[in-house]
Amino acid sequence: MSYLITLLFLGFTLHASIVMGSDDHAKSISSSESVSSTKSVPYTKDVPLPKKEFSTLEDMVCVKRHNLKAQLVQGIKDVQSKAAFDSAIVRCEAHGEFRGKPMHYQAGCSFSGRQWQCNKERLEIVVSANGRNVTMYPLGIAPESAYQILSKISTYGTFQSITMDDAIGSSCYISPSKDEEIVELNCQSTITVSFFCPQPQLTNCPRVVYVSPQLL
């Protein structure tokens, strides 16, 4: 099931609505998008989770780890699976602010053998980049450092005929590489940024050195 979680974190944009039930835990989530490697072949679809599963995931990811309630629990089903659900995305309620925007913990979970297993949660922050809202996930990098990189490269215009707005898209996972001068951004495209700037007077710094073909 780990491949589902990887797909979810890299390509999944949540547009969910929370429907309140008879108590705080009775929330079912629906979403209009599913993960796909192409526009025409979806691999997963969003499904509602029973109250029991919602409560279990809320407790695992939010309550036990951070003493927070869940803001969203999104069930996911492999379209070829006979199971009612195969995985889920869990977002905890806000625990603080970054530049005036709420910060949330988010984790991907898989269901196998009647048990849930959840990845280590990641920080989720919506920031402004070149006048657009982008959901940022800083991984192993300080939120302020990740934000400075994202906000700066968003103003660079184009790279080899690809606009930075298109390359960034709506969400980015930002992490350092083994080379301390390199930072990788997994966005709509994969973007490699270098802080090695031998001629800063002639080029932007940090420099965009690679943009992958877009993941449509």
Image: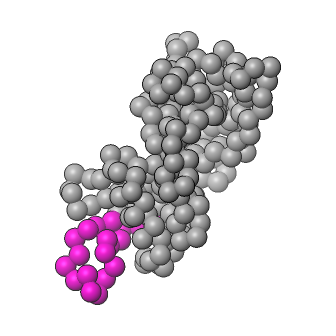
Residue for point 43% across, 63% down: 150
Q: Position of residue 186 (x, y in %)?
A: 43, 55
Residue 195 colored in magenta in the image = yes
Q: Nearer the viewer, residue 93 or 118?
A: 93
Residue at far top of view: 114
Magenta range is 193-214
Q: Nearer the viewer, residue 156 or 66?
A: 66
Q: Position of residue 91 (x, y in %)?
A: 57, 35
Residue for point 46% across, 42% down: 123
Please determine whether, in this image, residue 207 is positioned above or below residue 177: below
**Corner quadrant of residue 207:** bottom left
Q: Nearer the viewer, residue 37 or 184?
A: 184
Residue 96 colored in magenta in the image = no
Name the quarter where the C terminus is drawn: bottom right
Residue for point 20% across, 56% down: 179
In the picture provided, is 205 more to the left or to the right than 77? left
Dominant SS in magenta = loop
Q: Position of residue 115 (x, y in %)?
A: 52, 14
**Corner quadrant of residue 88:** top right
Residue for point 63% across, 45% down: 14
Q: Position of residue 50 (x, y in %)?
A: 70, 19
